[in-house]
Amino acid sequence: MSSRFASQRVNAVLTEFGQITLLAREACVSLFKGRVAWRDLLYQVYFIGVKSQSVVLITGAFTGMVLGTQTYMQFHKVKMDTATLAVVGVSMCSELGPVLTALMVAGRVGAAIAAELGTMRVTEQIDALRALATHPVDYLVLPRLIAAHIALPLLTLEAVAIGILGGYFVGVTVHGIEPTYLWANMLKYTHQVDLVIGLIKAFIYGGIIALIGCYKGLSCGLGAEGVGRATTEAVVYSSITILIANFFLTLVMGKLVGLL
Amino acid sequence: MIEVRNLYKEFGGYPVLANLSFRIENGESAAIIGRSGSGKSVLLKHLIGLLPPDAGEVLIDGENIGPMNERQLLRVRRKFGMVFQGAALFDSMTVAENVAFGLRRHEQLTEREIADRVAGILEMVDLSGTENKKPAELSGGMRKRAGLARAIIYEPQIVLYDEPTTGLDPIVSDSIDQLMVRVRDQLKVTTVVVTHDMRTARRVGQRVLMLHDKKIYASGTADEFFASRDPVVRQFIDGVADAKEGLI
């Protein structure tokens, strides 16, 4: 009984993965056919990027301050206080910046996309689009996907910058670390490649959030319950996918950097 | 021309349409009637490719749309305008933006030309002055009119109506009926109306087809159909419940 349940679950997960892949392929077809609606794309960049700034900035700032404090507490024991911000810099650039930004955006934007498209589906607005000879992927998915790919790296840059500044502020004002060495060590140990890795990750996470949000919305069940479930699943699935993808991306990009 | 051959469709193992065939000629106006849940809307969605058949063929101007993918269907759908049961207006847009949607997507027109076309079509459906209203600010009848304006603004060859008068009071229903007749006569379009409103079927449909027991049970001109003595047709026209249903 339990093995049958497990095989059904695996089958369902693989089916969904396949359907999301097909959605991504259709979005690529749409992109290469030049079906981008520029006005909608601009609006989505505003909605996903500009409107997510406050939540991303708060997350980045407090993460940087907490990380700075924790690192200082350990490093102070071995008299390495001035290396505190270097740890904050490297962590924020390659790991915490992109992952926390993506999780915050998944909660805000992934849910909104799934709810909007889900409501359109249950009120026959998606069918109306199709009846008006408009492909839903051209009109609904592509602008959101491109906008998320653009917005996530920019939001990550902001989160990284505010996180490092938060760590610097706590280090200097609360823990009394010498500011010149603190900043110099951060610049010395935080390399460009750390930031590039973070931005590549953010670009990929943008796609994950938009694709899963769109897929859940377009395939949601009927009625208010269906929309509610699609919204919840969009957030949960994209958050889990981001965390799992982060592990593999760290592994692969770490190896690649090692080879260079 | 619309032709359906041996259409079969099931949901969750339960057949909704089986061996269903009929044909509607260019310029003809057909009303498809049947009880709630008999598969009328499912049938209508097959005609425009919103649902794929499990078996059988749907031919539009001789072209079988069943095996087409979503992108291939876009070309065929330009021949259609469809009015949905709940109007299905895009709630983030104004009435004018809704009505202009098809024009903006598929035709190269200036803003001035689009505005003129929208004003003209809104006047035709008696909705002048509502350009800047959102769908939530409209009554049920006004939404249906706006949905109709959106469907016919790019002058399609075929207009499909899904339960156009459901949920409307008799006076508003009458005005929608008149509007459908006006669109049919002025634009010379092929019209397919799915309804269980006998008055709409009689006024709009030059031919009436009755969907019963998963297939077209009866068809004929409006006069022939409403004079039918078949007990199933009679029961539906007269609106008489089964003895068992009367007890519910």
Image (tube, coloured by chain):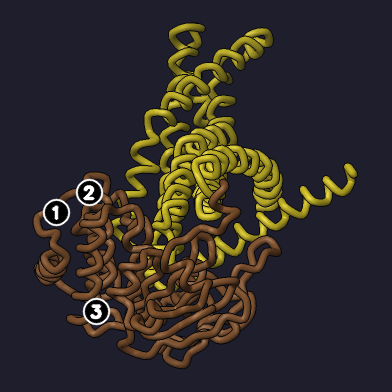
Chain colours: A yellow, B brown
Can residue B46 be seen? yes
Chain of the residue where label 2 is placed in the rendered structure? B
Foreground mark, 3 or 2? Answer: 3
What whole-number distance in Å separates the C-alpha atoms at marks 1 and 3? 24 Å
* Residue depicted at x 56% and y 13%: A69
Badge 2: few (under 14), some or many (20 or more) residues near its Cα, within 10 Å?
Answer: some
Q: Secondary structure at mark 2?
A: loop
Vertical placement of B245 versus B107: above or below? Answer: above
Residues at circles 1 and 3 in contact by the CB criterion of under 8 Å: no
Residue in the picture at 60% in, 38% down: A236
Identify which amino acid the numbered label 1 is placed on. Answer: Thr
* Residue A199 seen anywhere in this rendered image of the structure: no
**Three-letter amino acid code at disc 2?**
Leu
Looking at the rendered image, the disc whose residue lies closer to the viewer, 1 or 2, is 2
> Numbered disc 1: what chain?
B
Q: Earlier in the sequence, mark 3 or mark 2?
A: 2
Depicted A17 relative to depicted B68: above or below: above
Whole-angstrom CA distance, mark 1 to mark 2, is: 9 Å
Q: Which numbered disc, 1 or 2, marks the residue that appears first in the sequence?
A: 1
Give the structural element (helix, strand or loop) at label 1. loop
- Judging depth in this view, the residue of B58 and A39 nearest the camera is B58
| Quarter of image, res B19 | bottom right
Q: Residue A205 location, x and y as percent?
A: 55, 46
* Residue A23 pos. (x, y %): 55, 62
Q: Are marks 1 and 2 in contact (CB under 8 Å)?
A: yes
Nearer-the-camera pick, B231 or B203: B231
- Mark 1 — residue? B130
- Where is mark 3, residue-wise? B184
Residue B181's label in the rendered image is: none
Which residue is at 60% across, 64% downward? A22
